[in-house]
Amino acid sequence: MKWDEFFVTGDPLIYGADVSIALTTAGILFYLTYFKKWKWLWTEWLTTVDHKKLGIMYIVSAVLMLFRGGVDALLMRTQLAVPEAKFLDSQHYNEIFTTHGTIMIIFMAMPFLIGLINVVVPLQIGARDVAYPYLNAVSFWTFFIGAMLFNISFIIGGSPSAGWTSYMPLASNEMSPGPGQNYYLLGLQIAGIGTLLTGINFLVTILKMRAPGMTLFRMPMFTWSSLVTMVIIIFAFPILTVALALMTFDRLFGSHFFTLQGEGMDMLWANLFWLWGHPEVYIVILPAFGMFSEIISTFSRKTLFGYKAMIWSMLLIAGYSFLVWVHHFFTMGSGAVVNSVFSITTMAIGIPTGVKIFNWLFTMYRGKIEFATPMLWSLGFIVNFVIGGVTGVMLAMAAADYQYHNTYFLVSHFHYVLIAGTVFACFAGLVYWYPKMFGYKLNERIGKWVFWLFTIGFNICFFPQYFLGLDGMPRRVYTYSEESGWGPLNMVSTIGGFMMGVAFLILVYNMYYSFRYAKRETHGDAWNGRTLEWSTPSAMPPFYNFAKIPVVKSLDHFWRQKQEGKVEKLTIKDIKPIHMPSNSGVPFIMASFFFIAGFGMVFEWMWMGALGLIGVFGTLIYRSFEYDDGYYVSEEEIIKTEKISN
Amino acid sequence: MANKSAATEHGGFPWKHLIGFVLSIVLTLFALWIALGTDLSVTWILIIIFGFAFLQAALQLLMFMHVTENSRKGGFSGRIQIGNVLFGAFVAIVIVIGSVWVMSAGHAKHDKHDAPKTENQDGSHESEEHGSH
């Protein structure tokens, strides 16, 4: 392989990206070296097993990926703004919609939610960390390395271009030669390890590490939604792992699972992909539902309406989510019986979701609603998500789906559920728990600007796409003719897209502005909250979270204590040494070996792949013989941290 | 925290794990030999290696996955275990039977490109039909 095949060449946009990547890297290296931050980086972040710090790193990565995926989206919208535009060629456009979809789902939505789960869930259940802190670090670093491996594809070797669904035979060696598709397979495979480990970790954490008295039906709704999400992750992700492995075998080792030759079944890939892919949709929406439940309850100053109905509808969704996958490929032609059955299950899954919508509305009914930024996002969610949900039921009708399939109607539908559902929730949750992570709130005035600009831009961008779809505009086309008449609505859509981009920039500016000027919180209860994470005396909980593990007597225990004026004060008698896990650099090193293995296999340099895997096994073996049972935080240190004087 | 109970449970040599590990490898090698080293028909090979697969799954549940483990207080863990196994069985059935059904119903069965399975259509008719689409 020559150097000009190794690096992507010939496109000014890519050269621009090369330069900006080189400058950013140089800038970061200079900053770390000049301010002598290397040791700080290693001891505070790279080796940490603290769930709060890992959560923050998840969220920072997710925001970066949101930027990358967002730039992809704006490039696409620019190309589509006018008919027969020459901004991107067909191949480049294909690469961009592939990376946009993959990054937004796998490397933005999931880590953003998992990041917030990491920060919040152990605090909500009154635990000092997750069940397996070391495994948590492995989860983060494998996700991060998977994401990085996928992201370097656009400057080294070329990006995948077969769509985020990577249907066979398009994704086969014959039709997608080169390393691009391998990046997709290996990047997702490595990140998937992290997700599966997170699923196991938080399932055990929520089942086993709750504070005394917190029965399952006293858990906050966000914790419940996380629990159900983890169950879905554990059962759905292995399907993706196997499907990716089989396609990797097809591409790298000449097997015939999904190929056209040798009795392979190309549509079996679509079948397996969506067997994972539909539960995945619920993996990214259920935590969002949980967050909105917390926020709506907090800012309406009322207990969540229909707490148990919420839980049962989530459990129902968890089961149903495995029974609807065929609605992603009704047009494959499985016949009337198959399509009818999956039509019905798809419509049925709308019912528990509808139950939840009404529960949120009744939670607000006669509540004292405070229109803080997180609440605005939640209200925006209800309105826009319902639009997405209703069009979803339209798509669920198999016969009608033959018309909508593969058009912009579908594109608009899933952006209405994924942006209004998941992205709104990420923003709402970020603003809501920001004081828990950083000790100050994001500026509310700027935050409201972001909300309105983003929500209006979102509707301007995607509402016209319903009509473009009904007018016959297919998805994934890189251009269209003047005569089609799709030009004006596409221009409107592009304007809306750029409004969302501006809103994102203002959000990032708000982080900077608030870092400089926001009033620092003096206590842990920034929003007059209801759940245990707000009960810590300091704004940011110390690394051991709770000096004394709370004893829970009811749902919304902290709120009730506040109402009755019985919030317990910490005294010296309560302080006992706290057992905490030690930091470890092994997860980071293990993930680095995964990167070497993945990179080698992408380019089919098997010696490099083998080397990387030997390294991975080496770190596993090292870990097996490591006897580190953690350490105890002394009473003096706790007393000093908690500032107890009596 | 959790380390203490783990340490007491795992005292002594882990015979259970060793036997499970060796049996797993033997079963896998045996399946490989059946598939590559014998002259049995494809149907029989499939039946036998499926049998080995179920045996191995049972073995792993028994030897590694604590399927017989009971919680001493309240039976909470026991209920969780049963729930997990039942949901796992549900998902496994959906994946296997669902996939077979979806991939073999309606037009989807044409997906087998090399060998058209429908009896009343010969090869030429098949290609003609595809050509007209």
Image (cartoon, coloured by chain):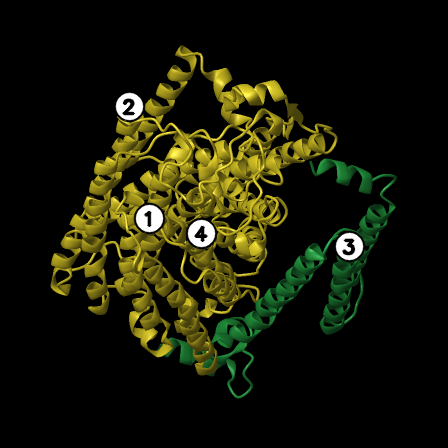
Circle 1 or circle 4, nearest the eye: 1
Answer with the quarter of the image where residue A304 lies: bottom left
Q: Nearer the viewer, residue A126 or A499?
A: A126
Q: Residues within 10 Å of mark 3 (few under 14, many from 20)?
A: few
Dot 4 corresponds to which residue?
A: A287
Sequence-earlier tag: 4 or 2: 4
Q: Residues within 10 Å of mark 1 (few under 14, many from 20)?
A: many
Q: Is residue A433 above or below residue A295?
A: above
Q: Are marks 3 and 4 on the same chain?
A: no
> Percent from the top left, x then y, of residue A586?
61, 29
Residue drawn at (56%, 72%), measured in percent from left and top?
A: B98
How far is the residue under mark 2 from the one under mark 3? 55 Å
Disc 1 residue type (three-letter)? Phe
From the rendered image, report the letter of the chain displayed in yellow: A
**Position of A361 compared to A338: left or right?**
left
Q: Give me the disc on residue B69.
A: 3
**Position of A646 compared to A483: left or right?**
right
Q: Nearer the viewer, residue A89 or A112?
A: A112
Residue drawn at (42%, 71%), measured in percent from left and top?
A: A346
